[in-house]
Amino acid sequence: MTENSEHLTSAVDWYIKLTAEDASPEDHQAWMVWMNQSQQNAAAWEEIKSTLNTFKSIPSDIGMSVLNRNKNKVDLSRRATLKNFVIFAAISLPVGLLIHEELTPEFEQKYLTKVGERKHVLLADGSRIILNTNSVITVNLTKLQRSIKLHQGEMLITTGHAHGFDSPLLIETPDGHIEPMGTRFNVRKFDTFTRVSLFEGMLKVRSKDNDVNFYVHPQEQVDIYAMGVVSSPTQWMLSDAWSNGYVEVNDVPLQTLINELARYKQGLLLCHPDIKDLRVSGTYSIDDIDASLNGLTQTFPVRIQRATRFLTMVLPDV
């Protein structure tokens, strides 16, 4: 790696840290120290900021306006920026790593995955869970209660009924509750709602602030909001392909596909505004994001620019 590349990589690292929701005043002070260490650092920061300004994804005063911000206050404008431009960052285990774990009865356990990781979990009641990228669940199994809480991310569940576990299984999310009845289903947490896709059996779904039960049948998909449950308009997501290492899309905007691929990639993956509405279809690996991006260039008028190992851009092929 050249010296310039090292400075650029550091600049991207700082951008990721400063745009995280838990960024503290101390982080910003440390960033300013780094900026003042050398002209190369400052130049690298300006280059990264200029590049990201092409995507309109970085405020011009980043790092300064929040120095006096309360550490626990959520900066809504920064959160909106992150949502709009698909910025994901984490340090992960190797992509596609599959780990089988067993949960003993009467014990609450947390399971999590990092960006790009999938994990298989076998519960003592016979239920099987596959956790998708960047996910967190808490499992509580006793003779009187069976519950799985999805805190963030996504999971695919096949329910089990081992001897000694006769209580109903309850799936809890910040938006509501799901009671499966001999089922195989997918649950994904979005910012403001939870999406549930059913493949086998039946589900009884209830939102957090509404006691009305909503019944879901096979090949149906619903979105659970705090105030109610509605049928999902995004039927292409009615798929468990991710559990096998790929995503399928059919005539969706390129931005939508990039959003999905970005969930599995470390660093920043950005789509240029000029091509975000390009319609794309196909099957794309989530275990090898670089290969999927390269495949796009073979079919669509796009090119891939990798500024650093933490910054990848999908650009018009002009």
Image (cartoon, rainbow, N blue to C red):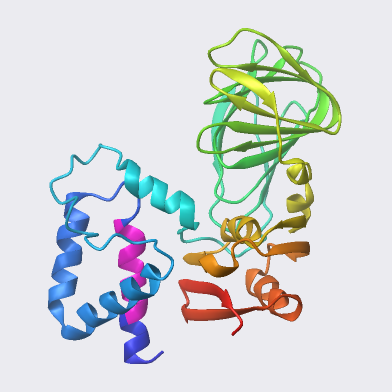
| Residue 192 seen from this side | yes
Pick the front one: 225 or 125: 225
Q: Please, is residue 193 above or below residue 156 in the view?
A: above
**Which segment is the magenta one?**
8-18
**In the rendered view, would you say 224 is above or below 287?**
above
Say which residue appears at 45% left-offset and 71% top-offset: 310
Residue 164 versus residue 65 in the image, above or below: above
Position of residue 155 measured from the top left corner of the image (x, y, whole percent)? 67, 40
Residue at (51%, 80%) from the top-left corner?
Answer: 306
In the displayed structure, does residue 202 sit left or right of residue 190?
right
Is 125 on the left-hand or right-hand side of 19? right
The answer to if 178 sits in the magenta stretch is no
- Direction top: furthest residue: 211
Residue 88 seen in the figure: no
In percent of width and height, residue 253 lies at 67, 58
Near-viewer residue (299 or 101) = 299
The residue lying at 56 percent from left, 49 percent from top is 113
At 46% from the left and 72% from the top, the residue drawn is 311
Q: Dominant secondary structure of the magenta stretch?
A: helix
